[in-house]
């Protein structure tokens, strides 16, 4: 059997040290020589040579810094990709195990009575919907990351998108799992991609469910405000520390473990929501207090009055 040779491996800190020594030392020496030539040279020739040497040293330093930044960015990207893959695998495994378990129960006819069989089938459908939501989220993120995500907007009220999000959300829940409230009164039309907005609201609802303890109370609101429509998803969950509130919208960022257990996730849900909101020329903000809950509020600008000819 062919033996794979181990490649000589330089650690990350080794590469950093090499870069620093390989760039900083010659730059330091060159700068010193340049300064000596400028200060002690006396004639115009030494001055020119000194300035050239110092400029060259500074340019080398700039190139070295750019290289270092690129290197760090690549390392971070590689680390994020590995974490992303691990998280996706982890999130796939949980519903798959549940589906197998309920399937085996049905197969072995342990679920003797009709009611138990119905519960098993419902659970399988629920877990399949969860799998579908994860796959949709990953594919959607891929389109956004590759710059291929476009929004097909039409003049409409947001309420239909909210209904779609709620229906899909309820498909992921067991009966009585969440106390769901609605306070919806928006009437204004906006230019919107209904599917994309529904997906964004679903992501917020799923998070509200995921980052809340045993007793889950979620409220979906909508109302007309000056210049547009506001949609809010409110929960009574773990909340988000102030220092983290901006970073949660960055792709792959996952908050600290504030629940008793590690909530499954891959860190792209809010990045998708932010892209959808930007694609609609809207804004998103979060109000949150650790231990008390969070509210994510979207603002979408109203479509110009019908007949005025404006289109977003
Ligand atoms: P994921 O949920 O897969 O980690 P998201 O992009 O949807 O990815 O969320 C990023 C982070 O923001 C989460 O890891 C979590 O820490 C925090 N977060 C999002 N929504 C909520 C919420 N409703 N309550 C508390 N924390 C939240």
Image: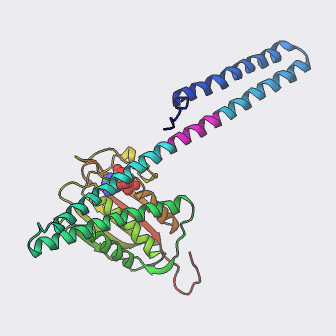
Q: Is residue 212 left or right of residue 287?
A: left
Q: Is residue 72 magenta?
A: yes
**x and y percentages locating residue 207 in the rendered image:** 32, 59
Q: Which residues are magenta?
A: 65-76
Q: Magenta residues: mostly which secondary structure?
A: helix
Report the front residue among 129 and 113: 113
**Which corner quadrant of the image does residue 165 belong to?**
bottom left
Report the front residue among 204 and 263: 263
Residue that sits furthest to the right in the current view: 44
**x and y percentages locating residue 89 in the rendered image:** 37, 53
**x and y percentages locating residue 19 in the rendered image:** 62, 28
* Residue for point 57% across, 24% down: 17
Q: Is residue 197 visible?
A: yes
**x and y percentages locating residue 126 in the rendered image:** 26, 68
* Residue for point 47% across, 48% down: 81
* Residue for point 44% across, 76% down: 194
Give the answer, above or below, for where 183 lies relative to 307: above
Report the front residue among 151 and 289: 151
Q: Is residue 262 left or right of residue 43?
A: left
């Amino acid at each position: 059997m062919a033996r794979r040779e181990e490649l000589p491996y330089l650690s990350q800190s080794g590469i950093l040290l090499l870069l620093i020594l390989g760039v900083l030392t010659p730059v330091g020496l060159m700068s010193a020589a340049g300064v000596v030539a400028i200060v002690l040279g006396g004639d115009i020739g030494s001055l020119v040579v000194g300035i050239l040497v110092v400029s060259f040293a500074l340019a080398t330093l700039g190139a070295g810094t750019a290289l270092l930044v690129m290197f760090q960015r690549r390392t971070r990207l590689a680390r994020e990709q590995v974490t992303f893959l691990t998280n996706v695998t982890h999130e796939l495994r949980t519903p798959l195990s549940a589906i197998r378990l309920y399937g085996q129960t049905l197969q072995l006819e342990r679920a003797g009575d009709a009611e138990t069989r119905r519960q098993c089938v419902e659970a399988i459908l629920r877990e399949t919907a969860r799998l579908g939501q994860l796959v949709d989220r990953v594919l959607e993120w891929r389109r956004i990351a590759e710059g291929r995500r476009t929004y097909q907007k039409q003049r409409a009220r947001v309420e239909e998108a909210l209904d779609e999000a709620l229906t899909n959300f309820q498909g992921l829940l067991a009966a009585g799992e969440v106390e769901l409230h609605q306070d919806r009164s928006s009437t204004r039309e906006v230019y919107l991609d209904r599917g994309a907005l529904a997906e964004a609201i679903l992501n917020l609802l799923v998070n509200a469910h995921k980052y809340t303890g045993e007793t889950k109370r979620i409220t979906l609101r909508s109302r007309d405000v000056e210049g547009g429509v506001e949609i809010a998803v409110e929960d009574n969950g773990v909340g988000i520390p102030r220092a983290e509130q901006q970073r949660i919208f960055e792709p792959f960022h996952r908050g600290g473990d504030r629940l008793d257990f590690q909530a499954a996730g891959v860190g792209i849900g809010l990045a998708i929501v932010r892209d959808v909101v930007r694609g609609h020329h809207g804004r998103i903000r979060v109000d949150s207090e650790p231990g008390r809950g969070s509210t994510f509020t979207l603002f979408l600008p109203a479509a110009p009055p019908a007949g005025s000819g404006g289109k977003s």
